[in-house]
Amino acid sequence: MSVGLDRMRSAISTLDDANQTLRMELGSSLVMLKMVAEDLEVDSQTELVEELGEATKEMIELMEEFDCHNKALHSLRDEYTIGEDTTDFETLLSERAENIKAQSYVQPEQHVLYKQFQEAVWKVHHAGEPMPGQEKEDLIMYNTQFNVVNTKCPISGKEVIHLDNPVRSSDCMHIYDKEAVMNYLKQYKNKARPCPCAAAGCPKPLVMERLVCDPMLKVEIQELRMRGRVNTQVHEVAECTELDD
């Protein structure tokens, strides 16, 4: 393997670390837009809520572009080989990003994050009621809190908002500390029976290939973290008010 190829892959890996931080900031911005919209909906500020809805769609569009570009970088790092001809990396990267976008692009109005925004606003005055035209399956799919089914890792006991490397089972949706669940899976490596989910009462097995850390998981954990901070601040303000009285 050439030194040039090693350097290119190292540079992409370094850039990927920075991209992950930016991706989290974009996710945090989406969560903040939704939380502000909920507060405005309480006061029936419909026009402002609609503006935030448009801003949410624009942010989703940006995130989709960002994800396509990031996937293109990953494919370049993993698949590129040096040939005799000079490579125009800007063109190559752009073409790969466009191909990925053509295969996976979702209109912002149909994106799960925008559906969650709509659901959150609707629930302010219609808690427990499905949105007009919404099926029960949609209610489950688009409810952010539904996917955060556990707030602590069933193995390590750490709060999911404090996990450095969270992963989620695609089968039962339980969230784990990656290092803890990998060690747990090793205990069943040579056993005849499958590894059971460590969450109490969960009948699903744990399969290494089905443990993932997708962008949605990070957004959902970030929302859990941000809402926890807001609730803590509200509680502290309430306590101070009581003391003043």
Image (cartoon, rainbow, N blue to C red):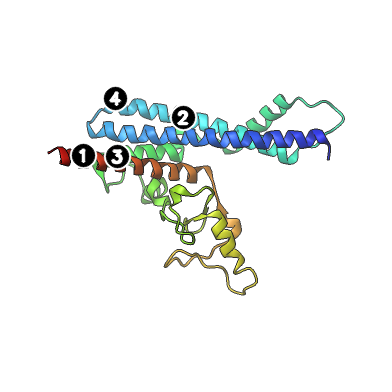
Q: Nearer the viewer, residue 187 or 80?
A: 187
Residue at numbered disc 1: 240
Tell whether 5 sits left or right of 203.
Answer: right
Tell whether 37 sits left or right of 168.
Answer: left
Other residues around mark 4 within 10 Å, as few (<14) / some (14–19) / many (≥20): few
Q: CA distance from mark 3 to mark 4?
A: 28 Å
Q: Quadrant of residue 110?
A: top left
Disc nearest the viewer among 2 and 3: 3
Residue located farthest toward the bottom when viewing the structure as drawn: 192
Disc nearest the viewer among 3 and 1: 1
Residue 101 in sight: no
Q: CA distance from mark 2 to mark 3?
A: 27 Å
Residue at numbered disc 2: 59
Other residues around mark 1 within 10 Å, as few (<14) / some (14–19) / many (≥20): few
Numbered circle sitting on residue 233: 3
Q: CA distance from mark 1 to mark 4?
A: 34 Å
User: Of the residues under marks 3 and 1, which one precedes in the sequence?
Assistant: 3
User: Of the residues under marks 2 and 1, which one precedes in the sequence?
Assistant: 2
Residue at numbered disc 4: 47
Please tell me which residue is depicted at 74% across the width and 33% down the height of the picture.
8
**Type of amino acid under label 4:** Glu
Q: x, y percentage for residue 203?
A: 46, 67
